[in-house]
Image (tube, rainbow, N blue to C red):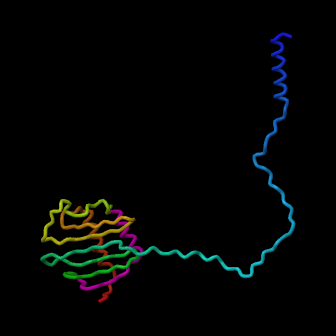
Amino acid sequence: MTQSTFKITILLFVNILFFSCNKKTKPIVSPSPSYDVVEEVKIERSEEKPIQPIPETPPKPYLLISLQKLGCHGKCPDFEFSMVSNGEATFHGKKHTKRLGQYAAQANAGILLNIKSKIEEANFFQFEKMYPANGNFIKELPDTYILVNYNKQQLIIRNNHDAPKSLLDFQKFVEELIEQLQWEKIN
C-alpha cells in the first residue's frame, strides 16, 4: 500500500466512525425527582390571627415655608408667618396688619401641594441669598425674609429691594395664601 492509499483509508475510517455514532444529548432540564409519600401530616391551627401590617410612622413635621416682614419708619406691615409640612400655620402680627397678635390655622393638602408646585415653578433654590445681591441695602426700606425648606434643600432670602420678578411673584403668592387661611386667635 502506498502512503497516499493509506491516508485515504484512514480518512474514510475516521469519517465512518464520526458520522455513524449516535450523539447523546443531555436534557436541558433534569427530570424532577419522585418521592414516595410515607405519611400525610395535617397541621391544625388552634387560632387563626390575621397578619397585622406594620404601622407606618408618619414623617415628622418640618418648617416648610416662612415669611417675615420687618417694619419700616412708616406704616409698613410687620409680621411673621410660618407653615409646617403638615399644614399647621402660625401668624404673629406686630404692626400695621389686619391681624395683631398670635393666630393659628390649618392648611389642607391642596394648599400644601400648591405651595410645593409654586416652589418648583419659581425654581426657588436658584435665587441669591439676598437682594440686592451686592449687599447695598437701603435702611429706610423694610426687609422681607423668605424661608423655603423643600426636597432636602433650604434657602433663606433677605429681600430689601431689587429682587427678580419671579421672587416677588412668589412672595405675593405667600401673602395671598396668608389671607386665604381661616385664622383663629390664640392669645
Q: Residue at x 79, y 40 (%)?
A: 25
Closer-to-camera residue (52/3) = 3
Identify the image quadrant of the C terminus: bottom left
Can the viewer see residue 87? yes
Residue 55 falls in image quadrant: bottom right
Residue 170 falls in image quadrant: bottom left
Can the viewer see residue 111? no
Assess whether residue 106 is covered by the magenta stretch: yes
Start-end of magenta stretch: 98-121
Q: Give the left or right position of residue 8, taking residue 149 as reference.
A: right
Assess whether residue 10 is covered by the magenta stretch: no
Q: Residue at x 35, y 82 (%)?
A: 105
Closer-to-camera residue (147/37) = 37
Most distant residue in the top direction:
2
Residue 183 against residue 124 in the figure, above or below: below
Residue 1 against residue 187 in the figure, above or below: above
Most distant residue in the bottom direction:
187
Residue 53 against residue 125 in the figure, above or below: below
Q: Position of residue 118 (x, y in %)?
A: 34, 66
Q: Residue at x 83, y 19 (%)?
A: 10
Q: Give the left or right position of residue 6, taking residue 118 as reference.
A: right
Q: Position of residue 76 (x, y in %)?
A: 17, 76
Identify the image quadrant of the N terminus: top right
